[in-house]
Image (spheres, rainbow, N blue to C red):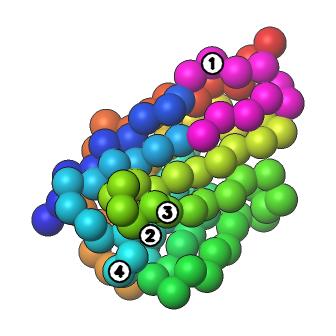
Amino acid sequence: QAQLVESGGGLVQPGGSLRLSCAASRSIFNIYKWAWYRQAPGKQRESVAILTSVGTTSYADSVKGRFAISRDNAKKTLYLQMDSLQPEDTAVYYCNRAPPFTPYDWGKGTLVTVSS
């Protein structure tokens, strides 16, 4: 198990940017497969960005070209750079292991609100 703590959310205007961080209790982001997920009010949690142990990335169509997932192994941190944010990006964002790996216990997430 590992503890995951998300941060960096906030209120931003449409077209703005945010960088989310996910800090782990140990150095694990260079192994397994990782994802940023989000859950909007009344909707199921969905994966928006994936990073493999070898550095391959993939994105949901809804965020492709606007979001970028990365990691800093030395800092034990996973990042999600979000640009050109839109109101439909409003959600609580979480990081966790991606399939086929079993998720760790979910953190509290970080709330992103995109509104004018």
Write the start and end of the magenta stretch as one range. 10-19
| C-alpha separation, residue under disc 3 versus residue under disc 4 | 11 Å
Residue name at image x 60 percent, y 40 percent: 19
Q: The residue tagged with tag 1: helix, strand or loop?
A: strand
Residue name at image x 65 percent, y 48 percent: 81
Above or below residue 17? Residue 61 is below
Instruction: Locate residue 83, reporting x and y percent.
Output: 77, 42
The disc label shown at residue 31, or none: 4
Q: Callout 1: few (<14), some (14-19), or many (20+) C-alpha neighbours within 10 Å?
A: some
Name the amino acid, label 4: Ile
For the C terminus, the image quarter is top right
Instruction: Locate residue 20, reporting x and y percent.
Output: 53, 41
Which residue in the structure is indicated by mark 2? 34
Q: The residue tagged with tag 2: helix, strand or loop?
A: strand
Residue name at image x 49 percent, y 63 percent: 71
- Does the CB distance between marks 3 and 2 fall below 8 Å? yes
First-in-chain label (3 vs 4): 4
Q: The residue tagged with tag 3: helix, strand or loop?
A: strand
Instruction: Locate residue 32, reporting x and y percent.
Output: 36, 80
| C-alpha separation, residue under disc 1 versus residue under disc 3 | 24 Å
Above or below residue 112? Residue 115 is above
The disc label shown at residue 71, or none: 3
Which residue in the structure is indicated by mark 1? 11
Q: Quadrant of residue 86?
A: top right
Residue name at image x 40 percent, y 48 percent: 22
First-in-chain label (1 vs 3): 1
